[in-house]
Image (spheres, helix red, strand yellow):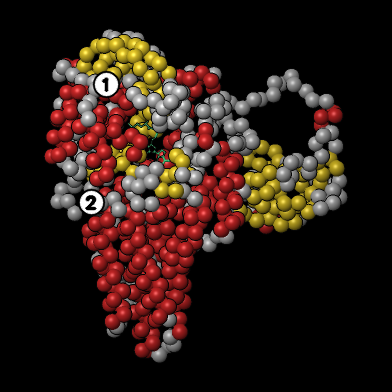
């Protein structure tokens, strides 16, 4: 543990506001969150930042298409990104928006320093420009297409301010040489070194062709080029010009995808060197999650969304899969099949099963109190040693950002414990003093192992390990447990165990995948327009409130007659795993029994509905809600600002199947 609380500053890229987060963006943010939790448990004073990159031509165009001002457009998008991170409990300490005043000031200040030090001059630039990636392109693909995204490039000529990047070839190479850990992983470092050795051209850092950007003071219509603007967000998040007061700068690690490593390891240190400011300690580039061997993008229709996965399998399942499945730094393929397979094998049958077995036996045999281990046998010691040595190994692996291997080590211990219980069979032991004492030792050992495993896995699985922690009656919160003090043998006999809460219910693979896909489909192609958050800006549907019928619009009786409503009687009602607002009902409508989903779970207990007569729209086209088929609609009033549903009903006896007219 550091002697005095050392600081650790982690960043994610700031994400473009012209799209919504998919699993790729979520991956970077999850890794940052894992590191944040881990470093805190190692005693560091940690700050993690994320944010949104809100300037540039793309935003101008998307806002225009949506028919609203850029400021309104980016505000809605930033809210939508924040909301998702909140839902996924990915808590950043700072969320920077590049339209924040504090950020604007920082960019202008950095430019002034670079200029005062002689690294900025005025010139003209003509080039092919990719408006989607916000970058000039030197080597276009045939047909003047962007080599990164395959979309058409545009020729742009304009007066620009240039940054003397060429002056930094040697300083950068010296820097990489002196701090070999600056670029990670190693393969990326070699790639960047050869790029810089190949020579650096000066870089245009302002635009006159773009309106939506941070103005260059006294030089309007110049606005800053997106990368000069965006990279500076890391500094504005922790104090900007007053960074010394906060004491967090330089960043300890910038986590980025491999697509943006050059900006972070060449431009960014050069800007800072020119301004004579401290340079970050490390840039860690991870690979991409691919879908069908291609980078995800909405235009290709191959995006994977985080929400449906979390709704179906829980937040920890997503975190575990992303970190366990792919070696950090390399590309990996995403597949729902692999996700659910891992969920069932490692989480439901692995950790979840070990915890529930142990909890049940402790409850049954020791009335929910941690027993005292008695005489230890060699097999108990073997397990103890495995757990103890896992501690050091796991910390080392986390330190090296080898998340998959850290989890592999932890799950190695979980498997050993499973085997231990199967061999020792505490459930088969009787009530003689010797057998009771043996049972106590075995169950204490299993519980102690669960404690160690939970503390080690907490950064990746915060939700489920917190539940195990409560089960084990640990008073100090798991997130505040110092990993440096973690040792085998600290579980005190006599501790009162807490309540066991189910961790990872097993799921049937085909059904789970179907439901995740159906939920993703709903989110990508919402049937109901939502006014709150734009779904995507590329489709142009973003940020435009849904149409509302003008008060004077009337329908004829023939229109109303198209809606077939009947009296239905609820036969069964149940909650739906992963959909806390929905109930799955079966309703007798006279001619048949229908399955209908209703968004009333927060207001009606399922049992209270059985036998109730309701008004049902019976000729609606069937659709899937949260992946569950719904064939009809129950009519309810929407009451109060939160739209509480109150079921429409009848005060007199009515026959099931009677038509409402
Ligand atoms: N705004 C810039 C970054 C500026 S940082 C000063 C940007 N934004 S982005 O919205 O395109 O997000 C880029 C980041 O999202 C990538 O660097 C990577 O971290 C993550 N990912 C986006 N797609 C990804 C995958 N398919 N797989 C893994 N991560 C990917 O670039």
Is residue 101 in view from this perspective?
no
**Residue at x 34%, y 11% (from the top left corner):** 158
The image quadrant where one finds ligand 1 is: top left
In the rendered structure, find residue 531 and report the number of the disc placed on it: none
Neighbor class of circle 1 (other Cα within 10 Å; few <14, some 14-19, many 20+) is some
Query: Image height check: is 62 above or below 208?
Result: below
Where is residue 224? Give x, y as percent: 32, 19
Residue 498 is drawn in which quadrant?
bottom left
In-front residue for pair 127/93: 127
Q: Is residue 372 above or below residue 559?
A: below
On-image quarter of the N terminus? bottom left
Q: Can residue 488 be seen in this view?
A: yes
The dot on residue 203 is: 1
Q: Position of residue 149 (x, y in %)?
A: 44, 31
Could you tell me residue 64's position as x and y percent? Answer: 51, 18
Secondary structure beneath disc 1? Answer: strand
Front residue of 363 and 547:
547
Residue 510 is left or right of residue 292, and the answer is right
For marks 2 and 1, give the one nearer the viewer: 1
Q: Nearer the viewer, residue 55 or 262?
A: 262
Residue 14, image x, y percentages? 36, 33
Task: Looking at this view, name the residue that lies furthest to the front.
Answer: 142
């Amino acid at each position: 543990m550091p002697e005095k609380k050392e600081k650790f500053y982690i960043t994610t890229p700031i994400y473009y506001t012209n799209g919504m987060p998919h699993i790729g963006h979520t991956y970077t943010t999850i890794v940052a969150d894992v590191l944040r939790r881990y470093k805190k448990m190692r005693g560091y004073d940690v700050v993690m930042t994320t944010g949104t990159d809100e300037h540039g031509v793309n935003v101008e165009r998307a806002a225009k298409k949506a028919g609203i001002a850029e400021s309104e457009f980016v505000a809605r998008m930033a809210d939508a990104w924040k909301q998702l991170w909140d839902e996924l409990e990915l808590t950043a300490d700072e969320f920077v928006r590049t339209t924040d005043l504090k950020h604007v000031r920082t960019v202008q200040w950095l430019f002034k320093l670079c200029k005062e030090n002689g690294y900025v001059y005025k010139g003209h630039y003509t080039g092919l420009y990719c408006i989607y990636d916000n970058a000039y392109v030197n080597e276009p693909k045939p047909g003047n297409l962007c080599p990164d995204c395959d979309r058409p490039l545009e020729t742009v000529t304009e007066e620009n301010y240039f940054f003397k990047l060429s002056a930094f070839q040697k300083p950068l190479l010296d820097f990489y040489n002196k701090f070999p850990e600056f670029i990670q992983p190693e393969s990326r470092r070699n790639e960047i070194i050869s790029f810089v050795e190949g020579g650096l051209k000066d870089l245009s850092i302002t635009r006159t062709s773009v309106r939506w950007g941070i103005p260059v003071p006294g030089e309007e219509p110049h606005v800053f080029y997106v990368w000069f603007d965006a990279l500076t967000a890391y500094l504005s998040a922790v104090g900007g010009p007053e960074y010394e007061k906060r004491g967090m700068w330089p960043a300890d690690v910038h986590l980025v995808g491999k697509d943006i490593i050059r900006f972070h390891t060449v431009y960014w240190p050069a800007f800072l060197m020119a301004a004579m400011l401290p340079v970050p300690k490390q840039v860690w580039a991870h690979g991409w999650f691919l879908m069908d061997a291609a980078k995800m993008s909405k235009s290709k229709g191959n995006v994977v969304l985080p929400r449906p996965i979390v709704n179906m399998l829980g937040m920890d399942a997503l975190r575990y899969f992303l970190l366990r499945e792919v070696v950090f730094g390399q590309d990996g393929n995403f597949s729902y099949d692999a996700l659910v397979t891992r969920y069932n094998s490692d989480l439901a049958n692995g950790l979840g099963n070990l915890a529930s077995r142990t909890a049940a036996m402790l409850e049954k045999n020791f009335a929910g109190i941690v027993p005292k281990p008695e005489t230890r046998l060699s097999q108990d010691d073997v397990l103890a040693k495995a757990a103890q040595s896992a501690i050091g190994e796991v910390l080392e692996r986390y330190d090296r950002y080898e998340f998959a291997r850290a989890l592999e080590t932890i799950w190695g211990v979980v498997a050993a414990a499973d085997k231990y219980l199967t061999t020792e069979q505490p459930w088969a032991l009787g009530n003689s003093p010797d057998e009771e004492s043996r049972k106590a030792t075995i169950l204490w050992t299993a519980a102690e192992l669960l404690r160690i495993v939970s503390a080690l896995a907490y950064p990746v699985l915060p939700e489920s390990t917190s539940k195990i922690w409560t089960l084990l009656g640990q008073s100090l919160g798991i997130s505040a447990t110092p990993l440096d003090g973690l040792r085998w043998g600290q579980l005190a006999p006599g501790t009162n165990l807490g309540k066991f809460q189910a961790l990872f219910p097993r799921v049937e693979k085909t059904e789970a995948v179907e439901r995740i896909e159906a939920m993703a489909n709903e989110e990508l192609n919402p049937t109901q327009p939502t006014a709150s958050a734009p779904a995507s800006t590329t489709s142009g549907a973003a940020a435009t409130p849904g149409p509302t019928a003008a008060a004077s619009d009337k329908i004829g009786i023939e229109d109303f007659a198209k809606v077939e409503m009947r009296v239905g009687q609820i036969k069964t009602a149940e909650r739906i795993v992963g959909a806390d607002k929905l109930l799955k009902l079966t309703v007798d409508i006279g001619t048949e029994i229908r399955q209908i989903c209703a968004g009333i779970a927060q207001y009606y207990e399922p049992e209270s509905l059985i036998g109730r007569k309701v008004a049902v729209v019976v000729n609606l086209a069937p659709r899937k809600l949260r992946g569950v088929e719904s064939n009809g609609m129950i009519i309810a009033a929407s009451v109060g600002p939160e739209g509480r549903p109150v079921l429409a009903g009848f005060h007199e006896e009515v026959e099931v199947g009677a038509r409402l007219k």
